[in-house]
Amino acid sequence: MPSWHSYRDSVDELHLLNQQAKKTFRFQKPVEMNQDSTWTFLMMADPFIDGANYFITKPLLQKYGEEKAKEIFGRWNACFDKQGQNLYLLEEVDVK
């Protein structure tokens, strides 16, 4: 998250959207370890800010450069490949 927090979009309007999105992030930390020695973290961004950056690629590239960003992203993906990761993008809908 350090690279995401320090990310500065070159377009001022997009940067403002990213700052708004940053304020909506909430993390649920695990209370205890899972039986398979892994941890489960939940991250929520609510409300979803259309046009904001929710991806880690641009911030990693900006902070670390292409080679180091590839290395970091590769380690991150390898971790999730072993344990599995679920990512959901949900939109709340008024059913009234």
Image (cartoon, rainbow, N blue to C red):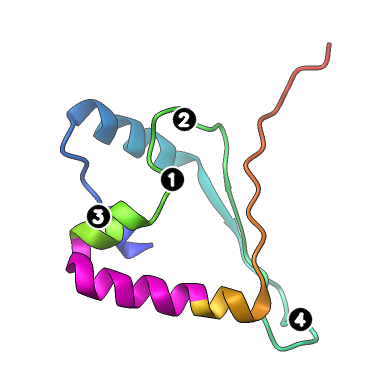
Task: Tell whether label 3 touches label 2 (CB within 8 Å).
Answer: no
**Which one is earlier in the sequence, the residue at label 4 or at label 2?**
4
Q: Which mark is residue 54?
A: 1
The disc at residue 29 is: none
Rendered residue at 82%/16% (across/down) = 95
User: CA–CA distance between discs 1 and 3?
Assistant: 13 Å
Give the image location of residue 56, x and y in percent.
38, 56
* Secondary structure of the residue carrying numbered label 3: helix
Give whichever of 51, 66 is nearer the camera: 66
Q: Quadrant of the C terminus?
A: top right
Q: Residue at x 53, y 33 (%)?
A: 48
Q: Is residue 44 magenta?
A: no
Where residue 20 sits in the image (x, y, percent)? 38, 33
Q: Indicate the secondary structure of the residue bearing disc 4.
A: loop
Q: Tell me the residue that label 3 is attached to.
A: 6
Q: Give how far apart the Cα atoms at labels 2 and 3 are.
A: 18 Å
Q: Mark 3: few, some, or many residues within 10 Å (few <14, many ≥20)?
A: few
- Residue where numbered disc 4 is placed: 34
Marks 4 and 2 close (CB-CB < 8 Å) = no
User: Vertically, is 16 above or below 25?
Assistant: above
Residue for point 28% across, 55% down: 59
Could you classify mark 2 by the number of other residues whose Cα lies within 10 Å: few (under 14), some (14-19), or many (20 or more)? Answer: some
The one of 74 and 49 positioned closer to us in this rendering: 74
Disc 1 from disc 2: Cα separation: 9 Å
Separation of marks 3 and 4 at Cα, in angstroms? 31 Å
The amino acid beneath tag 2 is Ile
Type of the residue with mark 4: Asn
Which residue is label 2 attached to?
49
Q: Which residues are magenta?
A: 63-77
Contact, mark 1 vs mark 2 (Cβ under 8 Å): no
Q: Amino acid at mark 1?
A: Tyr
